[in-house]
Image: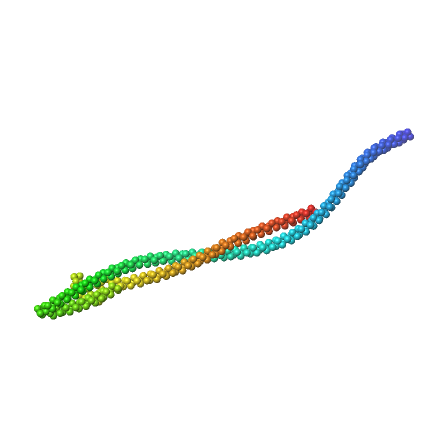
Amino acid sequence: MHEAKTAAHDRLAKELSELHEKWLELRKQASALEQKNQSLESDATNVKFREANLQQEIEQLRSNNDWYTTELKTRSDDHSKYRKEKNAQIAQLQRDIAEASETIDTLRRAETLLRQHIDELKNKAEEDRLRIEELENAASAAEANFRIELDGARRLASLHQQNNEMTKKRLEQLQADSERIQEDAATEIGQLQADVELERNRAAEAEARTAELETLVETLKSDNSDLRSSVRVPATPRHGMSMNGGFSTPGRAASPAVFSPGGSQLKADASKTQLLIENNDLKKELRKVREKHEEQTSILNDMLQELERRQPEFDELRRQNDALVEQNNDISNLLEEAIAEREAAQRDS
């Protein structure tokens, strides 16, 4: 019994001890819960404060969002209007660029055709220049040959002049001889008439001699006439005279006794005439070629002046094209920047 009480007392003491430990444990838990409660209350206060701050921030964000929405709408409208204007400007610039490109292509084709025509004219002018040089060389050679033949003709004319002077002197000598012969014949006839009675046997011979002398006088007169004609047109005399004043035997009509330049003169005149005709023809052809060359040179100079005159237009078109391209690039950059700003605003909102 006592053991049972002791055991019960021990059991109760043990249970009391366990209860005390549980109470201490619960006390600790209560303290921890109180601390946790205080911490939670503090956190709740902080949360309420943060909630108030967040509510203010939300209100601020809503206000900002409304402002950004309004600003975005305004900017979107402005951007749409700006984009429409720039699209219209871009379309106009593209049309202007296309027209300028077509104009430049047309001018380039015209320039190419003009350059080809200029090259053809240069080649033709070079051919004409070579032809002119050939004609000038031929004219120089012909002129040199003409000068040579002209000198020969002058020398031949000088020889003709000398021959004419010799013929004139010969004619004067023959005239003097004729007069002397006539005087001698008259003297001899007088002597024969004075001695006719004394020399009857010589009368027939004297008369024959007189007749012969008269015949010779007529022949000399005819020769004088022929010689006078030969002064204008040199001809071959038919009879001659001996160096001592006597008469020689009359020669044949075809036997030349004096140099006759008539045939050579005719040939020289014909050669001179032919050379003059050829020289005039060459000069005419050379003048025509020079006129043609001057005309082509004038056309070439006009074309070059036209190209030089239109060169500022080409340069102006190139500058306008470069300016249009640069303006198009600027507009493209502005469009890209506006699109980037709009996308950034959309991302921010």
Q: Position of residue 92 (x, y in %)?
A: 60, 55
| Count of numbered circles on the image | 0
- Point 31% across, 63% down: residue: 270
**Which residue is nearer to you in this view: 213 or 320?**
213
Q: Position of residue 345 (x, y in %)?
A: 68, 47
Its colouring scheme is rainbow
Q: Residue lying farthest right?
A: 1
Q: Position of residue 252 (x, y in %)?
A: 20, 67
- Point 26% across, 62% down: residue: 261
Q: Determine which quarter of the picture holds residue 20.
A: top right
Q: Residue lying farthest left?
A: 198
Q: Position of residue 170 (x, y in %)?
A: 21, 62
**Which residue is nearer to you in this view: 343 or 91?**
91
**Which residue is nearer to you in this view: 17 or 240?**
240
Q: Is residue 271 left or right of residue 247?
A: right
**Which residue is nearer to you in this view: 309 or 251?**
309
**Would you say residue 115 is visible in this rendering?**
no
Q: Is residue 49 above or below residue 165?
A: above
- Quarter containing the N terminus: top right
Q: Determine which quarter of the picture holds residue 150.
A: bottom left
**Would you say residue 225 is visible in this rendering?**
yes
